[in-house]
Image: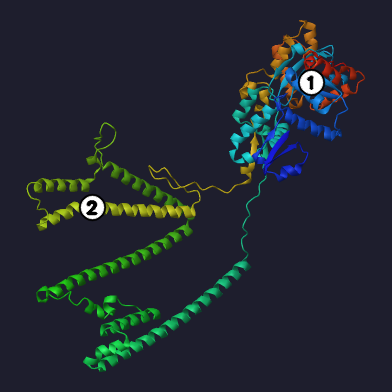
């Protein structure tokens, strides 16, 4: 494998684990591994040259030329063009003296296991590799390539299928599902089901057997820190500290209050002394005296004195009388309110109307303020009662609160529906399924429409004189009056609903308020804290469903034969139709390759081949001693044999006969 990394305008190529420091230094997430293979066929010979450089360097052959013969393996049914290009690369770039081209890895594995006595000279090698699987019959110890069968399904497809299933099942853990980790999970937990349909039925029923076959992969997880409850000593220490702080604040507040009282008393004495002096001043000298003191009039001094007295009583905590009773200048401020109009001049009448407006506005503000204070006190009293109920019986209190929330919610929703449909209950809807303008109006709105229509009909002829008479304004008041009672009641219900909803959110973490009808946005759900179970990946049906693609490639959309069907196809393709030879071959079926190590592979393969062979045919399926490395061991035994130099294709043959001679080159597996 080669990884091309671009950094600072420079391209760095890292092959295998040649320099792991580069992989840690550069950001490899923006690039990816590039393979020299497309399936099992070499097509990127530039990358293949990097891989060969790495391999020769690790073997110690770091000279300008490689002075050793090279033995290369390939899978069955590979194109000749790939073989020719590989020979050209080795002869031209590395100057190798000869090439033993090109052996099939399954054949080397079969011959090696034949020497070990695991299989016979007549048999069938079923090899399932990384990208391809193939079946090769052997007759008298030699492979019959004309009867070979190949399928482009291997361990890569099993791993990729498992990665897809786990990514769909656990999308929030995709970053943990790396290719290497999924490969480890496949080799550790996957198995071949004896009967795929029956195995699926077991997991569908959820029986105890399915639970026993389920595996759990625990991802790294750190529990949230648990807050320890403070000890009694700590609580006592905090309470004492809080009490000392409170005492200090109370002392500071008392000192500030005493200072304020002294300041107000000095101001009052000064204002009273100023009023006494003002009484002794002659009337002609009053303006000059007031200018010296900084006041505009005697009323201003009296007003400041009254305010100072009121502030002093507040500071001392005494009962404060209302402003109308306390402020002596208030009567002077509204001195024209109670005076009859017939004794007032036009300027005084104008001033009287102004005083009436100011007085009514002030009284309205005071009433509103008093109402807010009373409502706040009532609300605090209600909250205390609710808290007592909650502490007395929390379960009953929560149940009552939920019932009240449902009741208010239904009431508000019903009022909104009635307001939308105009209290329409007679079913007079138009053809489109909606309601008309008149049907959407309630009773008060329809009455106003009637008054408007009547006024327009009566006053619409001739000159428009509406508003001249007093009864016209009475009619205007009737028309402009809204259904205040319904709106107030609706607002009260909505306020109560919001209050109950807020209270439920505080004491019930599972409560989720209903979204308003017609609203596209709702409050996001409250997620519970993550637990150990949230970081567990459960492998159930995936354990046997993924390796099943070796027998049913159509599960991943590949319309080719499975391993058991490939065995039957290879036997039918034998050049000589001999019943005895076929029985000899089925007696020695060798499984090799990395994808043949799943538990249950031999039993499933034997059962599949038995279904396509005549009844009573002897079938023996065995596994290679080391399915992953037996091909290399067999090739090493062959390269160490005496006849190996005679089986090579030399550099002289390459220059004299050309690469096309490789098309007619036949590899001899005689060991």
Rendering coords of residue 264 (x, y %): 38, 84
The residue pinned by badge 1 equals 106
Kindly indicate the quadrant of the structure image that contains residue 522. Answer: top left
Residue at point 65%, 25% (across, down): 199
User: Mark 1, residues whose alpha carbon is within 10 Å: few (<14), some, or many (≥20)?
Assistant: many
Label ID, residue 398:
none
- Say whether residue 78 is visible: no
Q: Nearer the viewer, residue 23 or 379?
A: 23
Discs 1/2, front: 1
- Residue annotated with mark 2: 482
Q: Residue furthest front?
A: 656
Q: Is residue 237 visible?
A: yes
Q: Coloured how?
A: rainbow
Occupied quadrant, residue 446? top left
Look at 44% across and 55% down and name the residue there. Answer: 503
- Label 1, secondary structure: give it: helix
Horizontally, residue 67 falls left or right of residue 488, namely: right
Quadrant of image for the N terminus: top right
Residue 37 % position (x, y): 71, 27
What is the C-alpha distance between the residues marked 1 and 2? Answer: 93 Å
Estimate the x, y position of residue 490 in percent, counting from the top left: 31, 51
Relative to 459, residue 82 above or below: above
* Mark 1 and mark 2 residues within 8 Å of each other at the beta carbon: no
* 344 vs 327, nearest the viewer: 344
């Amino acid at each position: 494998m080669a990884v091309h990394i671009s950094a600072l305008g420079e391209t760095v190529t890292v092959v295998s684990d040649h320099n792991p420091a580069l992989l840690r230094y550069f950001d490899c997430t923006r690039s990816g591994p590039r393979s020299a293979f497309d399936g099992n066929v070499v097509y990127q010979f530039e990358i293949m040259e990097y891989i060969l450089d790495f391999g020769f360097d690790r073997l110690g052959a770091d000279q300008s030329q490689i002075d050793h013969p090279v033995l290369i393996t390939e899978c069955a049914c590979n194109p000749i063009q790939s073989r020719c290009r590989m020979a050209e690369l080795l002869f031209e770039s590395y100057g190798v003296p000869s090439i033993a081209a090109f052996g099939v890895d399954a054949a080397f594995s079969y011959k090696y296991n034949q020497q070990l006595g695991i299989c016979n000279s007549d048999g069938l090698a079923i090899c399932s590799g990384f990208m391809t699987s193939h079946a090769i019959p052997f007759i008298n110890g030699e492979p019959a390539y004309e009867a070979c069968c190949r399928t482009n399904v291997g361990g890569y497809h099993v791993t990729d299928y498992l990665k897809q299933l786990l990514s769909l099942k656990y999308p929030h853990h995709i970053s943990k599902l790396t290719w290497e980790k999924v490969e480890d999970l496949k080799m550790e937990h996957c198995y071949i089901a004896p009967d795929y349909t029956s195995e699926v039925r077991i997991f569908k029923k959820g029986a105890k057997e399915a639970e026993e076959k389920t595996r759990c992969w625990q991802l790294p997880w750190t529990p949230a820190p648990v807050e320890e409850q403070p000890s009694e000593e700590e609580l006592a220490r905090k309470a004492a500290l809080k009490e000392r702080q409170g005492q200090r604040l109370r002392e500071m507040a008392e000192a500030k209050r005493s200072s304020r009282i002294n300041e107000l008393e000095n101001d009052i004495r000064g204002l009273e002394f100023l009023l006494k002096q003002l009484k002794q001043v002659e009337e002609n000298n009053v303006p000059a005296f007031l200018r010296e003191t900084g006041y505009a009039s005697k009323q201003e001094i009296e007003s400041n004195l009254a305010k100072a007295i009121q502030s002093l009583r507040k500071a001392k905590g005494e009962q404060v009388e209302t402003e109308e009773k306390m402020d002596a200048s208030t009567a002077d401020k509204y001195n024209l309110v109670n005076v009859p109009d017939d004794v007032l001049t036009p300027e005084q009448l104008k001033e009287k109307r102004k005083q009436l407006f100011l007085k009514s506005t002030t009284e309205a503000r005071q009433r509103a303020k008093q109402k807010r204070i009373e409502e706040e006190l009532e609300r605090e009293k209600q909250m205390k009662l609710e808290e007592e109920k909650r502490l007395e019986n929390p379960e009953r209190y929560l149940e009552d609160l939920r019932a009240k929330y449902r009741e208010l919610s239904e009431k508000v929703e019903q009022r909104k529906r009635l307001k939308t449909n105009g209290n329409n209950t007679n079913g007079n809807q138009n053809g489109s399924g909606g309601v008309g303008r008149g049907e959407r109006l309630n009773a008060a709105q329809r009455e106003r429409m009637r008054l408007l229509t009547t006024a327009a009909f009566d006053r619409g002829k001739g000159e428009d004189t509406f508003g001249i008479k007093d009864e016209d304004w009475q009619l205007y008041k009737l028309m402009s009056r809204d259904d205040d009672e319904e709106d107030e009641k609706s607002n009260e219900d909505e306020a109560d609903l919001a209050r109950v909803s807020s209270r439920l959110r505080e004491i019930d973490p599972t409560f989720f308020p209903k979204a308003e009808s017609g609203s596209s946005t709702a409050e996001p759900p409250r997620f519970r804290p993550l637990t150990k179970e949230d970081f567990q990946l459960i492998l159930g049906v995936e354990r046997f469903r993924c390796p099943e693609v070796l027998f049913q490639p159509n599960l991943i959309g590949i319309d080719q034969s499975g391993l058991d069907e490939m065995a039957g196809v290879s036997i039918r393709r034998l050049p000589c139709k001999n019943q005895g030879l076929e029985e000899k071959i089925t007696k020695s079926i060798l499984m090799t390759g990395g994808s043949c190590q799943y538990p249950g592979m031999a039993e499933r393969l034997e059962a599949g081949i038995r279904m396509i062979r005549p009844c009573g045919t002897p079938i023996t399926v065995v596994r290679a001693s080391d399915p992953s490395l037996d091909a290399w061991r067999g090739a090493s035994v062959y390269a160490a044999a005496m006849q190996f130099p005679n089986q090579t294709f030399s550099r002289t043959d390459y220059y004299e006969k050309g690469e096309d001679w490789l098309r007619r080159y036949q590899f001899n597996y005689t060991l």
